[in-house]
Amino acid sequence: MISPAEIRQKAERWWPAVLKSAQTGEAYFPKELSRIGKVKPADRLRAFERIRREQDILLAQSKSRLGYGYTLHWVELQSRSVGRNRFIDRISFESLEDYLRFLGRIESWQHYREDWQRIVAALPELSDWCREKPREIVRYHEQWPNLLKVLQYFKEGYAPDRHYIRELPVAVPTKFIESHKTILLPLLDRVLPPELIREAFQGGRQFEQRYGLRYDEPLVRLRLLDADLARQYFSGLQDWSIPLRDFEGLSLPLKRAIVLENKTSYNNLLAFLTLPQLRATAGIWGSGFRVGLLKKAHWLHELDLYYWGDIDAHGLQILAQLRSYFPGVRPLLMDRTTLDAFPEYQVEAPESPVADLPQLTPAEQDLYYYLNTHRLRLEQERIPLAYVRAALEGIK
């Protein structure tokens, strides 16, 4: 037969539905427990003592003894062997109070009702969310006063792209919003109009971007290869890193840009030697698949744009990704001729699961299949300097 601990487990599973009933107004009790392990006729004699002990344990913790909790419903049966005895036939919770007192949830229930009513009074657009997520209302009981302050600020006084998250003019602790992004995300999505939500950004890590807050932006590293331009615009500084938004807004008299894949080959002596001074030209560190950061730099569409990465499957995938943002981008030193010119520097590379890259030209797609099938890589920094210089001379 079921034990008091198992009754508690079953009752706990009802809790979300009980919470919802407060909002719908539907009576949840009385409610009967299913599968209580009723005594089978064959066991009434064979296991009579065990059954009596189990029933005594249930009786000791029942409403008839404690004044609250589950109610035992009995049936009396006559047996020639053990005489007339009663056995538990059903177990139920007859009232909400019985249930709440049994679980020790009286105070939690009261807080829940108060919080739910406070939420929907302040922000009626959260009514559906409250019905869907009653346990979240309970979970954040102590935080609701501050959560509502934040939500009402975003709804009424919020202007995008003005504040960092810790400087928002809301009377909550400095780190409160940062530490409650998980609950604020679904709430803000319901409170804010769609035009203020940037759907491309998802999850707590992109909270600021999703709701138009300022944030510590990634840096884009750029090297001007034209000393005259560097002196004219940046006091001669040729190699610098700037926040992404500033990079997106650059306006320089450039004719071309070269996006490089690897930080190592961009940042060491080889990069300086292989990217010599080129008039009206800039080098940009793309850092592998991080080239996605460049997609909103619309001024790059006006330039002759090149991409130089390793000759391997991943390098061509990055080329395809960059071309999805900038259709005119051309590869630099990423062809079969360059690969075949230096067999001594080819190394093994992991196979890519990507089967098709529609942004590649037929020749590039053939190279991609070849590299992926043979698991080959020619790292860009292994290409001799003279070969690199000759290629760069061709784009001046």
Image (cartoon, rainbow, N blue to C red):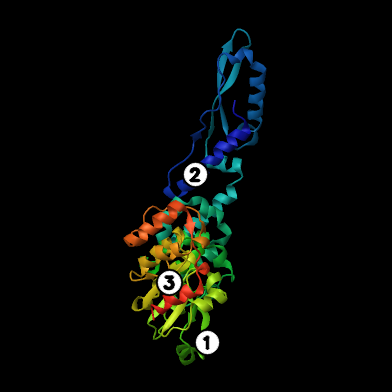
- Disc 3 marks a residue whose amino acid type is Leu
Disc 2 residue crowd, few under 14, some 14–19, many 20+, Cα 10 Å: many
Disc 2, SS: helix
In the rendered image, residue 264, in percent from the top left (x then y), is placed at 56, 70
Q: Nearer the viewer, mark 2 or mark 1?
A: 1
Q: Considering the numbered disc 3 on the image, is that residue within a helix, a strand or a loop?
A: helix
Looking at marks 2 and 1 on the same chain, the residue that comes earlier in the sequence is marked by: 2
Could you say which quadrant of the image residue 70 lies in? Answer: top right
The residue beneath circle 2 is 18
Q: Residue at position x 57%, y 67% from top? A: 176
Residue count near mark 1 (Cα–Cα under 10 Å), binned few <14, some 14–19, many ≥20: some
In the rendered image, the vertical position of residue 343 relative to residue 302, given as above or below: above
To which residue does mark 3 refer?
294
| Front of the two marks 2 and 3 | 3
**SS for tag 1?**
loop
Q: Is residue 297 visible?
A: yes
Whether residue 217 appears in this view of the structure is no
For the residues labelled 2 and 3, the Cα–Cα distance comes to 51 Å
Residue 311 in percent (x, y) is at 45, 63
Which residue is drawn at the image coordinates 43% and 66% (left, top)? Answer: 338
Q: Residue furthest top?
A: 80
Q: Judge depth for marks 3 and 1 and give the one in front.
A: 1
